[in-house]
Image (cartoon, rainbow, N blue to C red):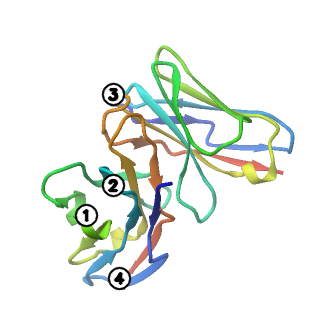
């Protein structure tokens, strides 16, 4: 069965620090990969997605993620975080065939101190 | 352009009761998926509806059932409620059934079982 692992459950950073959140998945076939963000009191929002092509994808608010197929990883990065990035971040995977579910990781709660 | 709307926002039930949650997809979307998010966990896939049929189901018992209407809106029904059913129930909509399109999430319904 598919699974997604997010290694960091809680991350605390100061403003302007760099961010990298790890995500690994277990599935040998073709996948679509997503990062969602949930700001306090808000719904899950799509941050970025990878379907095919360039493995380095750019999303909203300066976030990017790199798909490394050989490592089954899709890590999220941001060079300089802001206080407004405080949120919970979820990595999700979907098999690229037919009607398939999104499988989520357990999430990483990021706190950025001003 | 309306996003995904869910009702009610909060609900309190007792064990053994039945509950119905409702979802209206984002304008233009025809596929609805339901997820359960327990505290401290990532969303877990319940099922997905497209063209008024259940297309994919996660590892949830038959007490969880759903329906999609001709206008693409959807209901999630849970019978014989258990304490463990307390969670945030998320509805997500997308376009095109089995095509690889991102899912857009609603704010969720917080269900508490006493």
N-terminal-most mark, 1 or 4: 1
The reply to whether label 2 and label 1 mark residues of one chain is: yes
Front-most of residues B77 and B100: B100
**Could you give the CA–CA distance between mark 2 and mark 4, rounded to whole angstroms?**
28 Å
Q: Tell me if residue A43 can be seen.
A: no
Find disc 3 in the rendering and name its residue.
B96
Find out whether the residues at labels 2 and 4 contact each other: C-beta distance under 8 Å: no
Farthest residue in the front direction? A28
Find disc 1 in the rendering and name its residue.
A69
Marker count (numbered): 4
Farthest residue in the top direction? B70
Tell me which corner region of the image, top left, top right, bottom left or bottom right, holds residue B14: top right
Residue A30 horizontal/vertical position (percent)? 30, 50
Q: Tag 3: Cα neighbours inside 10 Å, few (<14), some, or many (≥20)?
A: some
- Residue sitting at x 39%, y 41%: B104
The reply to whether label 3 and label 1 mark residues of one chain is: no
Q: Tag 1: Cα neighbours inside 10 Å, few (<14), some, or many (≥20)?
A: few
The reply to whether label 1 and label 4 mark residues of one chain is: yes
Front-most of residues B102 and B47: B47
- Please name which of the two marks, 3 or 1, marks the residue nearer to the observer: 1
Q: Which chain carries label 1?
A: A
Find disc 4 in the rendering and name its residue.
A114
Find out whether the residues at labels 2 and 1 contact each other: C-beta distance under 8 Å: no
- Please name which of the two marks, 1 or 4, marks the residue nearer to the observer: 1
N-terminal-most mark, 2 or 4: 2
Label 1 SS: helix
The reply to whether label 4 and label 3 mark residues of one chain is: no
Viewed as shown, does residue B112 lie left or right of A73?
right
- Please name which of the two marks, 2 or 4, marks the residue nearer to the observer: 2
């Amino acid at each position: 069965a598919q699974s997604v692992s997010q290694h960091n459950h809680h991350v605390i950073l100061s403003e302007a620090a760099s961010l990298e959140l790890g995500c690994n998945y277990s599935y040998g076939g073709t996948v679509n990969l997503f990062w969602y963000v949930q700001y306090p009191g808000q719904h899950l929002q799509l941050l970025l997605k990878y379907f095919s092509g360039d493995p380095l994808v750019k999303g909203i608010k300066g976030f990017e993620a790199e798909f490394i197929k050989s490592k089954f990883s899709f890590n999220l990065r941001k060079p300089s975080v802001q206080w407004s990035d405080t949120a919970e971040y979820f990595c999700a995977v979907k098999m690229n065939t037919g009607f398939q579910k999104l499988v989520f990781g357990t999430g990483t709660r990021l706190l950025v101190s001003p | 352009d309306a996003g995904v709307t869910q009702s009610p926002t909060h609900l309190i039930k007792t064990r053994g009761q039945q509950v119905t949650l409702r979802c209206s997809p984002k304008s233009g979307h025809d596929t609805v998926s339901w997820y359960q998010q327990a505290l401290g966990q990532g969303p877990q896939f319940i099922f997905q509806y497209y063209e008024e049929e259940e297309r994919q189901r996660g590892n949830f018992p038959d007490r969880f059932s759903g329906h999609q209407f001709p206008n693409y809106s959807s209901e999630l029904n849970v019978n014989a409620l258990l304490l463990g059913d307390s969670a945030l129930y998320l509805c997500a909509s997308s376009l095109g059934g089995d095509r690889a399109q991102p899912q857009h999430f609603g704010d969720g319904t917080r269900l508490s079982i006493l």
